[in-house]
Image (cartoon, rainbow, N blue to C red):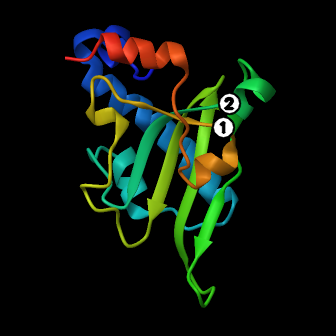
C-alpha cells in the first residue's frame, strides 16, 4: 500500500495516537543518539515532552526491502548516520530508522532546521505516504524507489 490509514488503525483518535507513536520512536532515536554520543536536539526533547512538531527534525513512514529480507517480522534499528561540520567540531545532522518488520520510521535531524515546505511529519496526516527504499544506504540518503505494482494500482484506483 502506498499510504497508511491512521484513521482505520486509531479511528477518530488518530491524531493523538499518531503523536504517541511518533513519541515512542522519538524516545528510541534520542536513546540511540545518546548511546552514539550525538547531542540530543532540544527539539526532540521538547517533542517528547508535548510539542506538536520539530523545526529541525522530521519523521516519515518507510519500508526498506533489505530490512524486510533480513529481519522479516523482527525489530531493527538502522545504523546511525551522523553528519559533522567541515571542521569536525560539531554535529550538524543525523539520520536513522527504527523498524518493526519492514515498516519503520525514518528520523532526520538538521541543526540549521528543515524548511517547513520541505518537512513532512507523518503524524500530521491521517493518510501519510510510505517512502520505499531498497536498503539502509538509500534510506539514509533519501533515494526512494517506486512502490510495487499492487501499491501503484491501489493508489491509482483511489485517486480523487
SS category of the residue bearing label 1: loop
Left or right of 137? Residue 114 is left
Q: Please, is residue 61 above or below residue 10 in the view?
A: below
Name the residue located 44 percent from the left edge and 39 percent from the top edge: 60
Q: Is residue 104 visible?
A: yes
Place of residue 41 in the rendered image (x, y in percent of width and height, measured from the top left): 45, 63
Labelled pair 1, 2 in contact (Cβ < 8 Å): yes
Q: Is residue 19 left or right of residue 99?
A: left
Q: Compared with residue 39, is residue 151 higher up or lower down, i.e. above or below?
A: above
Q: Disc 2 on helix, strand or loop?
A: helix
Q: Residue at x 40, y 55 (%)?
A: 57
Residue tagged 2: 65
Query: For the residue carrying disc 2, how many other residues have a C-alpha within 10 Å: few (<14), some (14-19), or many (20+)?
Result: some
Q: Position of residue 69 (x, y in %)?
A: 77, 25
Q: Furthest-right residue in view? A: 70
Snapshot quadrant of residue 112: bottom left
Decide: is 121 above or below 150: below
Residue 23: quadrant of the picture = top left
Q: Give the x, y percent position of residue 117.
A: 24, 55
Q: From mark 1 to mark 2, how far is it between C-alphas?
A: 5 Å
Kindly identify which numbered label has been placed on residue 134: 1
Q: Earlier in the sequence, mark 1 or mark 2?
A: 2
Q: Position of residue 121 (x, y in %)?
A: 34, 42
Amino acid at each position: 500500500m502506498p499510504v497508511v490509514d491512521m484513521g482505520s488503525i486509531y479511528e477518530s483518535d488518530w491524531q493523538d495516537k499518531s503523536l504517541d507513536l511518533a513519541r515512542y520512536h522519538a524516545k528510541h532515536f534520542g536513546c540511540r543518539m545518546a548511546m552514539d554520543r550525538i547531542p540530543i536536539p532540544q527539539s526532540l526533547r521538547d517533542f517528547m515532552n508535548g510539542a506538536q512538531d520539530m523545526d529541525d527534525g522530521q519523521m516519515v513512514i518507510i519500508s526498506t526491502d533489505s530490512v524486510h529480507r533480513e529481519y522479516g517480522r523482527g525489530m531493527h534499528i538502522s545504523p546511525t548516520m551522523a553528519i559533522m561540520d567541515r571542521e569536525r567540531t560539531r554535529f550538524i545532522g543525523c539520520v536513522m530508522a527504527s523498524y518493526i518488520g519492514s515498516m519503520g520510521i525514518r528520523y532526520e535531524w538538521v541543526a540549521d532546521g528543515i524548511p517547513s515546505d520541505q518537512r513532512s511529519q507523518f503524524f500530521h496526516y491521517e493518510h501519510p505516504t510510505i517512502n520505499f527504499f531498497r536498503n539502509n544506504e538509500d534510506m539514509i540518503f533519501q533515494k526512494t524507489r517506486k512502490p510495487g505494482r499492487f501499491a501503484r494500482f491501489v493508489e491509482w484506483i483511489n485517486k480523487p
